[in-house]
Image (cartoon, coloured by chain):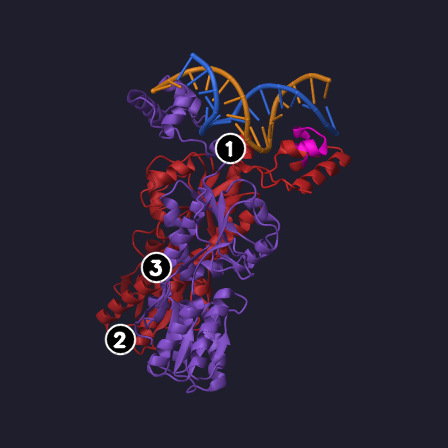
Chain colours: A red, B purple, C orange, D blue
DNA sequence: TTGTATGCGTTATCAT
DNA sequence: ATGATAACGCATACAA
């Protein structure tokens, strides 16, 4: 009748007593060992149900010397991070993959100086591995002592990474170039760009890809401004750019993320510029932000949810001791044409 | 020299050997016990540093019978959840409070049917308590067997909660009424509303507050449509409402969240309606979304980050065994006037 | 102040 | 197939 009067939670021991078997047998049943006779399995399961027994995870970790938990390391500024639907989608992918495993996910908010707490945590044995989606933090971890557990990076680490690093990413440079080329092919000639921060790989590579394309077509390569991957920051950058080149100085804009593109479009409309008639806008990500605004974004789609799932998958395989895991997982991108360009 | 050649991580035992003391003494030093002589403390710390010793968390949990971890239970649809800057801010508040404790945060993505995995997890001893920010899930947990660990809800649970539930919230109804009253005081008379879902307390209460105010002023109480707390959903709802009452049928709109307000403003502008000149728009939350769009939102501000911190604080105090913890923590709201109304 | 001994709840290695 | 029993790494009551 499960009447532990607010006492401590039931243990293997108690289940064993109720079922009239040994602890070892209960453990076997709980872990699905095949070599237990059917009637005993039944008896044990009955006892488990009656007592509402749930294995103690700490004890299990200790005995197994593995925790069945992985850490998700995200940058300090959680608000910024989570507010971008792109990351939210990645997290969704990660959790979906983790969910159909026995693993749980620990959210680790890392300071930019992870030398202390983060590293400590990664080495404390509570997690069997970690997914790092913060480049700055990732850099620091790479530069410093590496944790003892396997690591998978979301996005190529900025620091010249050794061959021994695992990461999931898209070919940002090629994708950005292809997107820009689409604008060129559509007849645009004054093509500007709002880029991400130049201290982040995704920022650098997408800017480079854009430059590859405009230079390849003999167009101006000075029509860009740098922003910070936020909507408002991008709006500001767009303002700077338009102030510099004039409201009719641009006929198209490659923006390095959909979230930023929403900010850019706001600024454009503020100035009475129509999208895409006066200025075509091309985004990047194909995140929920692409269709949240008034004008559906034409954008370079990257499979964020799949990327998240891939990160978790790579890590889980690493933890399982698989040896044939590829270091770089490069996912495909594609152009999704909607209304903004 | 820390030369464990890729062997297993150092243990208390090894530190004790190196420092030439007993395990108990090392444990005392590591846990900051005051009654250890200075020179021994020094010797132990040297050994700890040399071996790069980090306490094994599982063993510690087992011995202490507490895990120093809390779970953050969020709804299944992570994308939706995290994409709202309001929740991102709450998470930030939670992590900030957790960060200056010894606790870590476990992200638990709950299915709407938490009877199985979620509950199991909460009872497995890996977490000492949980913060639940998912009303549906919360309801199921409340309706069913309650976990053995303390729970704190973000937002009043929908189910008629017993006096024994802990939650952090604002007075949504009064705040919504006050916001609507502001619109009335500014001379608006055709005041509509885009509300949240009516199966969520925040949705219901804010709608009720709006109705309280318009009815109190003798205005129409039929100018509202229900949405789902997303930007695009709100845009659709606004479209329905305007289609119903005509483009000049409204001179103000109370929208139940800033994120939704951004969608509404998009729709308004789409129809050539100026904000706030033709239609004043009042938001709710004062989340980052309030200032991310083209027109800065006048909004009913609730202290989201403080709310998150409060949730963590209440939970941590509960876990610490404090007895004087208030069941309801109601945070103040205030009107922040910007440009949209 | 420091050390000894025991327990925390599981898993795993032995016998049987 | 099942049952003792010894780890797992740490904290702590008790001794010294």
Can see residue A155?
no
Assess disc 2: are there few (<14), some (14-19) or many (≥20) residues with their C-alpha within 10 Å of its C-alpha: some
- At a point 45% along the width and 31% down the height, the residue shown is B56
- At a point 61% along the width and 37% down the height, the residue shown is A10
Depth check: B228 or D4 in front? D4
Residue position for label 3: A229
The verdict on a common chain for dots 3 and 2 is: yes
Q: Residue furthest right?
A: A39
Mark 1 secondary-structure assignment: helix
- A36 to the left or right of B174: right
Q: Is residue A21 magenta?
A: yes
Q: Which picture quadrant has residue A221?
A: bottom left
Q: Position of residue A139 (x, y in %)?
A: 34, 43
What segment carries the magenta color? A16-29
Please give the label number shown on residue B62: 1
- At a point 55% along the width and 67% down the height, the residue shown is B199
Badge nearest the viewer, 2 or 1: 1
- Quarter of the figure with the C terminus of chain B: bottom left
Q: Chain of mark 3?
A: A
Can see residue B259?
yes
Please give the label number shown on residue A247: 2
């Amino acid at each position: 009748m499960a009447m532990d009067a607010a006492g401590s939670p039931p243990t293997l021991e108690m289940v064993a007593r109720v079922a009239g078997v040994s602890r070892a047998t209960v453990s076997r049943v709980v872990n699905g060992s095949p070599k237990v006779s059917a009637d005993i399995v039944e008896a044990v399961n009955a006892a488990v149900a009656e007592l509402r027994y749930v294995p103690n995870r700490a004890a299990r970790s200790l005995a197994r010397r593995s925790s069945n938990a992985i850490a998700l390391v995200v940058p300090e500024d959680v608000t910024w991070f989570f507010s971008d639907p792109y990351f939210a989608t990645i997290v969704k992918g990660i959790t979906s993959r983790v969910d159909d495993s026995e693993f749980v996910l620990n959210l680790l908010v890392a300071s930019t100086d992870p030398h202390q707490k983060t590293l400590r945590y990664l080495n404390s044995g509570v997690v069997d591995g970690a997914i790092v989606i913060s480049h700055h933090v990732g850099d620091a971890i790479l530069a410093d002592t590496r944790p003892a557990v396997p690591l998978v990076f979301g996005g190529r680490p900025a620091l010249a990474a050794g061959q021994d690093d695992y990461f999931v990413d898209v070919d940002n440079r090629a994708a950005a170039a292809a997107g820009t080329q689409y604008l060129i092919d559509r007849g645009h000639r004054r093509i500007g760009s709002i880029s991400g921060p130049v201290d982040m790989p995704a920022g650098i590579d997408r800017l480079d890809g854009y430059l590859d394309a405009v230079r390849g077509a003999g167009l101006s390569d000075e029509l860009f401004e740098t922003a910070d991957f936020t909507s408002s920051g991008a709006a500001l950058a767009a303002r700077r750019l338009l102030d510099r080149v004039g409201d009719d100085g641009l006929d198209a804009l490659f923006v390095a993320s959909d979230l930023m593109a929403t900010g850019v479009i706001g600024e454009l409309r503020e100035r009475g510029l129509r999208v895409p008639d006066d200025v075509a806008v091309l985004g990047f990500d194909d995140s929920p932000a692409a269709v949240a605004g008034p004008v559906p974004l034409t954008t370079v789609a990257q499979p964020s949810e799949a990327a998240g799932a891939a990160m978790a998958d790579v890590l889980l395989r690493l933890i399982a001791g698989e040896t044939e895991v590829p270091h770089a997982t490069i996912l495909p991108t594609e152009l999704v044409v909607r209304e903004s360009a």
